Image (spheres, grey):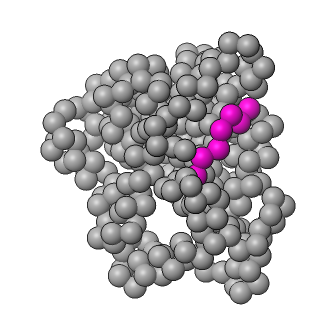
């Protein structure tokens, strides 16, 4: 597909329209950098089968259609799945399914790379456990799981709070309804360790006439607590920070976990192809 057609397609997506093409240059750069990072992360597995877990409007799958002849996007919302199928008809190699359907036998060990970006921070604890179980079940025995979540602790939180405040002043997206911290909460998250927790608001979104999805925003998310959950299900091979990996955890916007099935980690034939991705270190 020509670049012009791809750009036109992306702009019709609800997420891409608000973020990748945002009028706020900082937000646009931040979100585009994240997608570019994800593209570099999956490039070593080009030609395999990709699962984008929590694919949203399908933006990333469209952006990597040249790498993956077979790709699947999974979402919890049936209406979102149907919208993606209709909007991305011009990408016949991409199919979409409900996350609940990943329990079917045809998905077991079917994917060479499972990607989940900016999803788990919104999940309640039980949903995080269910997602990690899905990753372990759907990735192939020699496959890779890549998980990214935002950094919402330390100095990065202060910087993000400033950017979100400016975006709210500009009336962009939903930033005017952003979550707010008390002074004590903000101080705790600025100095958070791997046990720091504050109360996280729970929201409800209707995804069907009789189904309400419970979820979190960003407030109170601590990636260090998630890391311990991941380690119980998967072997973490590498951790990267973006958009500037050299800045480390203190000023990064996202953290990326590159994982393998636990059963594979001690195999002598273990491959660490992702370690050599250009531009990550």
Locate residue 32 relative to residue 279 in the image: left or right: left
* Residue at 58% over, 65% down: 251
Q: Quadrant of residue 3?
A: top left
Residue 12 at what x, y percent from top left?
25, 51
Residue 97 at what x, y percent from top left?
47, 32
- Total label count? 0
Residue 8 at what x, y percent from top left?
19, 48
Image quarter hosting the N terminus: top left
* Residue at 22% over, 47% down: 7
Residue 134 at least partly seen: no
Of 41 and 150, which appears nearest the observer? Answer: 41
Would you say the magenta stretch is mainly helix, strand or loop?
strand
Residue 124 at least partly seen: yes
* Residue at 60% over, 76% down: 158
Find out whether residue 240 is within the magenta segment: yes
Locate residue 121 relative to residue 90 in the image: left or right: right
Residue 103 at what x, y percent from top left?
62, 26
Find out whether residue 89 is within the magenta segment: no
* Residue at 36% over, 27% down: 67
Locate residue 185 relative to residue 167 in the image: left or right: right
- Farthest right residue? 195
Give the answer, above or below, for where 84 lies relative to 274: below
Image quarter hosting the C terminus: top right
Give the answer, above or below, for where 187 lies relative to 48: below
Magenta-tinted stretch: 235-241
Give the answer, above or below, for where 267 lies relative to 21: above
Of 87 and 150, which appears nearest the observer? Answer: 150
- Farthest top residue? 269
């Amino acid at each position: 597909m020509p670049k012009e057609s791809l750009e036109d397609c992306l702009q019709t997506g609800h997420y891409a329209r608000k973020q990748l093409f945002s009028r706020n240059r900082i937000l646009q750069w931040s979100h585009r950098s994240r997608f570019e990072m994800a593209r570099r992360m999956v490039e070593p597995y080009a030609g395999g089968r990709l699962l984008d877990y929590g694919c949203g409007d399908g933006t990333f799958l469209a952006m990597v259609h040249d790498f993956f002849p077979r790709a699947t996007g999974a979402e919890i919302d049936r209406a979102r799945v149907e919208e993606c199928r209709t909007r991305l008809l011009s990408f016949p190699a991409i199919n979409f399914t409900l996350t609940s359907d990943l329990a079917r036998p045809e998905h077991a060990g079917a994917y060479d790379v499972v990607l989940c970006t900016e999803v788990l921070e919104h999940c309640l604890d039980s949903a995080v456990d269910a997602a990690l179980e899905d990753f372990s079940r759907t990735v192939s025995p020699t496959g890779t799981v890549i998980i990214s979540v935002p950094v919402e602790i330390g100095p990065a939180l202060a910087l993000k709070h400033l950017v979100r405040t400016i975006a709210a002043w500009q009336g962009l997206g939903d930033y005017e309804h952003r979550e707010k911290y008390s002074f004590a909460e903000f101080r705790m998250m600025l100095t958070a360790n791997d046990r720091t927790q504050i109360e996280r608001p729970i929201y409800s979104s209707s995804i069907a006439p009789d189904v309400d999805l419970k979820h979190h925003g960003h407030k109170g998310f601590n990636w260090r607590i998630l890391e311990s959950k991941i380690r119980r299900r998967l072997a973490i091979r590498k951790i990267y920070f973006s958009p500037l990996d050299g800045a480390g955890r203190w000023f990064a916007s996202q953290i990326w976990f590159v994982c393998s099935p636990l059963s594979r980690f001690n195999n002598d034939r273990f491959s660490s192809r992702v370690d050599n991705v250009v531009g990550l270190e």
